Amino acid sequence: MLYRENGQFKTSYAADQQIFPIAQDRWAIVGLLVFAFIGIPLLVDEYLLRAILIPFLILSLAALGVNILVGFCGQITLGAGAFMAVGAYAAYNFHIRIEGLPLLLSLLLGGLTAAAVGIVFGIPSLRVRGLYLAVATLAAQFFTDWVFLRVPWFTDNASSGSVSVSNLQVLGWPIAAPVDKYLFCLGWLTVFALLAKNMTRSAIGRQWMAIRDMDVAAEVIGIRPLFAKLSAFAVSSFFVGTAGALWGFIHLASWEPAAFSVDRSFQLLFMVIIGGLGSIMGSFFGAAFIVILPIALNQFLPAIGGLFGITISTAGISHAELIIFGALIIFFLIKEPHGIARLWSTGKEKLRLWPFPH
Amino acid sequence: MKLRKLVLTALGTAVVLSSLAAAPAALAQVKEQFFPVLVYRTGAYAANGSQWANGYVDYLKLVNAKGGINGVKISFEECETAYATDRGVECYERLKGKNGGATVFQPLSTGVTFALTEKAPVDKIPLITAGYGRSESQNGAVFTWNFPLLGTYWVGADVAIQHIAKKEGGVAKLKGKKIALVYHDSPYGKEPIPVLQELGKTYGFDVQLLPVAHPGVEQKATWLQIRQQKPDYVLLWGWGVMNSTALREAQSTGYPRDKMIGIWWAGAEPDVKDVAEGAKGYSALTLQHGAEPNSRVVKDMLEQVYAKGQGTGPKAEVGQVLYMRGLLSAMLGVEGVRKAQERFGKGKVMTGEQVRWGLENLNLDQKTLDSMGFAGVMRPVQTSCLDHMGSAWVRVHTWNGSKWEFSSDWYQADEKNLRPMVMLASSKYAEEKKLKPRTPEECKK
């Protein structure tokens, strides 16, 4: 009833091509952004900000990057964690080695370095596809793990291999309190999500999708696979790299290569598969599912057990968390193989037809 | 339809979440000293982590059974980290404000310690890392909130070399020797490297570094290198399954176990009991205590906690090495609170900041230890502003095929070697963070 586009006529190309052609969607997004920027800092406590919202925002950005490569360009990668690590360590080195370099610039340079490394590891994609490419990108993972563990220069010769940053600030705005960190990550994510959305709607995004759908046909109609694939690797690695830099700088403040292990790569791939391949929205759903659900389960299970007078041991909760989480993944993949984003759009379709959905 | 369902679920979740957030406020009225417990009872290191956790929680129960800390009861809550840094940070954030505020955090993971070192000063909660963590945090002038009580990895490395020197018949005999370090490839495993290299330069022995990737079940290549290069001694800086794997590999390569020395993380029952006879002769450094089934505190534990059916773990494990480590860690935290109460008011709940003062002025002499039932378990500990470690005494124990037995006298780490390194590393940290080390006047506050 409320969600209906009757009477919204598009009279110009610009109106027809905007990101959210339906007025209700536009208002919902504006409302959500206002709530995220103003409402959340006022409402939630430090725990939610530091332990849930900040990781969620940063991993959403990483998932966006992975989605560009896997969802839009069809190149499976298992090296996302590696590019996060490259972004984080590159940003760290720029930050400490160049005195007075602004934080924003360090993070961007970290992303650019990750993009360069991404292009190098993307070269095999010109020859190999599918699972073989996944294995090739896995090499990136092991290579960066090795580099940051073994070459002391990258960690500023720290004896333990763990690096840390502090006293972060942007134009005199100290990024220290959880609210500042949250707003910084949110602002960053908003800008880059918009960039990603527009990129996927433009010529370059269409090239990626053409390559994904059938690379031979794409080549025949004049798309250069070299440019399309490597640009997807570069853009994706840039996003993932800045996410890695944020993860190190803003979320952990002190990290070691293990923070970007192969588990992280798998986690990011699961995020885009569960959230929805080839959907910007899906990256957010996937990140929410993977970041928030385990923690929520971990907190709610004792409470639920308490209702029935059962005390569950810490180990029991942890095992139950894994079991339920795994079961939910399987459930979603069976119920909707195209991810949560597809569920969302089916829901929207039904709402348009409401009260007579079919 | 779908949207409505989604909205309803979201609303429902929000309501439950907010009620959860409100719950701690109600509990805070109860006057209890809250001890958050970061544990790992699952994951690759569960076998070792759960023993530590049982000891930690049991000691808190024992203190409560004896009437609390000057009448203040202890409340505690566990949070599972699975030895992952990000989960550890999440647990820290979850527990730090609960039940009136956390007293002290003991992360039992070097990675989590590094991450929390940045956060603890902001939240004003002390960190005890008894026998682990970052070695330079011994300097309390820079690391105001870190307490690596009872020794660090650098102490361990120094004593390991002393022990080898003694076996060889003097430090002069170390010249030209080859000592291999088989280590867990993480901040934990890398901690002893600078000390070993420094000592290697001083005494003229050769240090070979052999990293093993997490979790440490794949060590064939490492032990092949050992077979080729035949080091005179192997130091083992492993954790969990890595230790038993290393011992099995040593057995199959034929490397003599009595030439292997582990750090305390590699010197407990779970590490050797599956290898049993194969690990015979293997030694490990104990930062003070070993398996102490005959100590009075263990007897108290069995009488006052386990006899009532309130024990956390299996009764057979009470008094084993890692159980004792957990128990001792809890005791240090509790004694910090007790000391703080002496200054800020007996029978009151202490804040993290007050407990920090207590830990910094900790003075457990032999009489106090005897009265608490720790006679023979550990030596006296006295901390100060500049020394947050309090004690650098180490014994070596050896596995005889069925249990750990002490095989050496007490060693004390050489301050002459370590202090300059601690000062150098901590002043580098202070410089990076633009911290001003506390002056002796500030310490007195």
Image (cartoon, coloured by chain):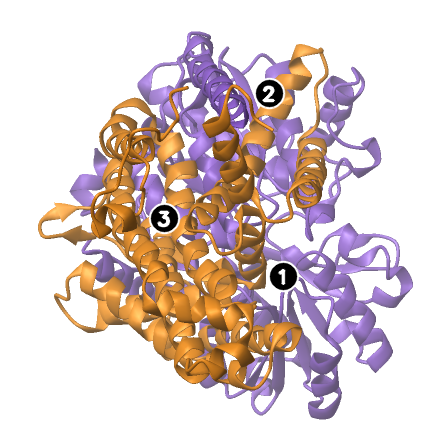
Chain colours: A orange, B purple
Indicate whether B200 appears above or below A315. below
Which residue is tagged 2?
Answer: B63
Q: Residue A251 carries which label?
A: 3
Q: Which secondary structure, mark 3? A: helix
Which residue is tagged 1?
Answer: B263
Q: How far apart are marks 2 and 3 (CA)?
A: 36 Å
Which amino acid does the dot numbered 2 rest on?
Answer: Val
Q: Residue B35 carries which label?
A: none
- Which of discs 2 and 3 lies nearer the camera? The answer is 3
Residue B177 at x, y percent in the picture: 61, 88
Q: Choose the circle earlier in sequence order: 1 or 2.
A: 2
Q: Which secondary structure, mark 1? A: loop
- Label 1, residues with CA under 10 Å away: few <14, some 14-19, many ≥20: many
- Label 2, residues with CA under 10 Å away: few <14, some 14-19, many ≥20: many
The reply to whether residue B143 is in sight is yes
Relative horizontal placement of residue B156, taking residue A162 as reference (left or right): right
Which amino acid does the dot numbered 1 rest on?
Answer: Ile
Q: Could you confirm whether marks 1 and 3 are on the same chain?
A: no
Marked residue chain, label 3: A
Residue B75 at x, y percent in the picture: 54, 19
- Rendered residue at 24%/34% (across/down): A37
Q: Which quadrant would residue B206 be assigned to in this image?
A: bottom right
Q: How far apart are marks 1 and 2 (CA)?
A: 29 Å
Q: How far apart are marks 1 and 3 (CA)?
A: 32 Å
The quadrant in which the C terminus of chain A is found is top right
| Contact flag, marks 1 and 2 (Cβ < 8 Å) | no
